[in-house]
Amino acid sequence: MIKHIFFFTLLIAASLAFVFLLLPFFEPILWAVTFAVLFSPLHKYILKKSKDRHSLSAFITLLLILFTVVVPATTISIAVVNEGTDLYSDIRDGVYDFSKPLAWIEKSLPIVSDSLSKVGIDLEKLKEGFSNTALYSSQWVATNLLNIGQNALTFSVLFILMLYLLFFFLRDGHKIVELLIRVLPIGDEAERHLLSKFAEVTRATIKGTLVVGIVQGTIGGIMFALLGIESAVFWGVVMIGVSILPAVGSALVWGPAALIFIANGHWVKALILFSVGALIISMIDNVLRPILVGRDTKMPDYLILLSTLGGLGLFGLSGFVIGPVIAAFFLAVWVMFETEYNPGLIK
């Protein structure tokens, strides 16, 4: 008995020490796992075509991820850093007045202003809060992206580590999964179900949030550029971020922009932006999400929102993806608990 207690105490202590040792590399490990899970169907297809040459198929998949995801994301991040920094300076110096739409509503639609006053909303405070939100939001995004540039050496090391781990996760992923199944004391069938559910929910959630957001932000950014709005790349990325918000989403960006056009007398531009925003950008969610996600695999919207905000708070911009991945694992564990243990507890 003492021997077993000592062994399991040693096992737990060694495991905790190992986890503590890996904490500085938590983000690259989780990014590598995320990419491996997301691109596992592609890797399996390439593996089949390469006649089960694991190293070659892993290398080809890694190159595809690098050139289709990582390089474009890095290029856009550099543009966002530059535009975000300039935009923050312009907002701080008063070049842009983001309270102008509310001022136009107050002047041109007094009934709206009166209605807001009746429910206790001070329009002046609302305008001040709107300007401060725009200032702090641009500052937060620019600062987070600028920190990556200022810590270029650390970022480069972690990035290379992520690619290195990703190669082995792709090549030896099936071996790692089998090892986990053998080691974990839950039961082989339950463990396979857990890992399968985690992969399924992760892919569905990332596709249903990130891909839909990217499409919305891309269309929105292109429209901003065509209509002559400065920092179009920055605002496109902001649309990607706010696309996780239920109901409103990217309308929080293109809506005020359309009102600013109206306030400045640019009615045609306002009509074009509003039409594209309402009929195309906002409808993308309803069209693409069911195709990419399916019916029963995606996390609830409120859980995606909370996990994304929590991820952003803990990990910075990386948390936009890392937060939902952790939530997917949380959901998979509880689904397994409901399936495997809850019936026994009820009995």
Image (tube, grey):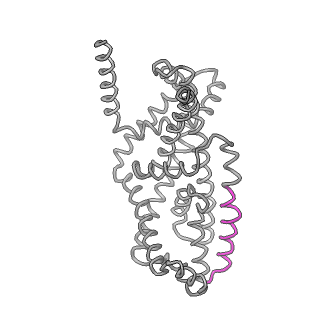
Question: Residue 285 or 83: which is nearer the viewer?
Answer: 285
Question: Residue 328 or 18: which is nearer the viewer?
Answer: 328
The residue shown at (61%, 85%) is 111
Magenta part of the chain: 265-284
Q: Position of residue 317 (x, y in %)?
A: 44, 52
Quadrant where the C terminus lies?
A: top right
The residue shown at (30%, 29%) is 17
In this picture, is 142 found above or below 200?
below
For this orientation, the residue located farthest to the front is 347
In this picture, is 243 found above or below 303?
below
Quadrant where the N terminus lies?
A: top left
In this picture, is 175 found above or below 45?
above
In this picture, is 69 found above or below 170?
below
Question: Residue 174 or 179: which is nearer the viewer?
Answer: 179
Q: Position of residue 28 (x, y in %)?
A: 42, 39
Q: Is residue 93 left or right of residue 208?
A: left
Quarter where residue 221 is shown: bottom right
**278 falls in the magenta region:** yes
Q: Main secondary structure of the magenta part?
A: helix
Q: Position of residue 46 (x, y in %)?
A: 63, 29
**242 falls in the magenta region:** no
Count the numbered circles shown: 0
Q: Is residue 177 left or right of residue 48?
A: left
Quarter where residue 16 is shown: top left
Q: Position of residue 343 (x, y in %)?
A: 57, 28
